[in-house]
Image (cartoon, rainbow, N blue to C red):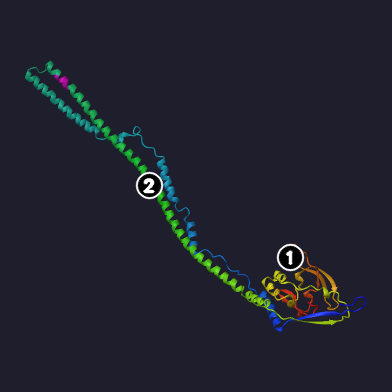
Amino acid sequence: MGKSSGSQTSTVRNVTTLPAWYESAAQGAISEANTAANNLAQPYRGNTVAGLDPLQQQAINLTGQNIGATNPAFQQAGQTAGQVAGYTPQNFLSGDLSGYMNPYLENVEQAALGNMDQAYKQTLNTIGDRAINAGAFGGSRQGVAEGVAAAENARQMGDLSAQIRAQGFGQAAGMMQSDMDRAMQGQQLNLQGAGVQGDLANAQQNAYLQSIQAAMSAGQINQAQAQALIDQTVSQYDAMRNVPLEQLNIRLAALGGTQVPISSTQTSRTPTTGNPFVGGLGGAMSGAQLGSMFGPIGTGIGAIGGGLLGFLSDERSKTNIEPLGMDPGSGMPMYAYDYKSDVENAMQTGAPMPPKRVGPMAQDMPDDMVDEIGGMKVVRNFGFGGF
């Protein structure tokens, strides 16, 4: 590796050689991975929720317009019911019966009494004639007979007058009672009409809402169909978006499952200057480490083997970086560091941290010695210090 206490030491270097076809396939997979990472289609950004169907929107609008549509009918029914509730039936005793009395009652009474008076006079004549025939005209017997006839006539006329007036009062009372009954029936009919009016308003409202519900149901069917078409589009988009990754994984799986003949050669050299850092360079990353950084692409690449890809030397994959100075043999800056994946693994599993790694940063190395995978730099030149 270098001089120690003024003496030279001999360094043996192992060089691993892969078949050209395998190295070409691996480089093609890396190139395809880089292309897939840089050109991966963006997530679906279209609308994923179907909007309201026109029938649904129309039903919603009609529902809003129908709010309070039956209020006038209910108000009118309420007013009618209130009027009926405040109705006071007419009391017969407090009523005015005069309006129902026969206006010709007096004429009828006078005519009847006149007829009775005529009959009375005829009775007097008959008594006089009898007295003349008996030769007792003007006597006391005639006077008694006429007095009796006058008293009977007065009694009959009083009875007749009372009877005529009683009949008139009875007829007037009956007509007044009929009107009172009809008024009460009218109020009952008004109350029934108010109830019917309210029922009709309810029936109309229910029928209207049923038609709106039917429109809403039809709109929901259309909306469900539109949603199914959107879901189908999203599913197809995601499937096409994953096609390049699936193609790459097939190639990586083929490479990882292939038995590759590897030949090794050893050479020795005697360096003129010491190189204390080369022997401590960080080793290749495992497939699990690559997987944690690149997802399915890194996992597939890790299956190829650390000897093919070298190791991930990108500065962004490391932490706890400490500068150690320049490597005399390569002229590159050297650092001591930990891989972020080792730190995360130790934190998650409680496993002990591996020893600190020593090596360069890919950002400091020539372009022909590095590749890029998913935006991260990977050392690929096998002639530099075994990494």
Q: Earlier in the sequence, mark 2 or mark 1?
A: 2
Label 1, secondary structure: give it.
helix
Residue shown at 26% from the left, 33% from the top: 168
Q: Position of residue 387 (x, y in %)?
A: 78, 77
**Membership of 88 in magenta stretch:** no
Q: Position of residue 286 (x, y in %)?
A: 73, 72
Work out whether 93 lies above or below 134.
below
Q: Position of residue 243 (x, y in %)?
A: 61, 75
Picture quarter with the N terminus: bottom right
Magenta highlight range: 145-149
Answer few, some or many: residues within 10 Å of disc 1's Cα (few below 14, many 20 plus, some between 14 and 19).
Answer: some
Q: Which residue carries the number 1 mark?
A: 345
Tell me if 383 is positioned left or right of 47 in this view: right
User: In the picture, residue 330 is in which quadrant?
Assistant: bottom right
Q: Give the dominant element type of the magenta stretch: helix, strand or loop.
A: helix
Instruction: Give the amino acid type for the residue marked by disc 2 in the picture.
Output: Gly
Label 2, secondary structure: give it.
helix
Q: Which residue carries the number 2 mark?
A: 193
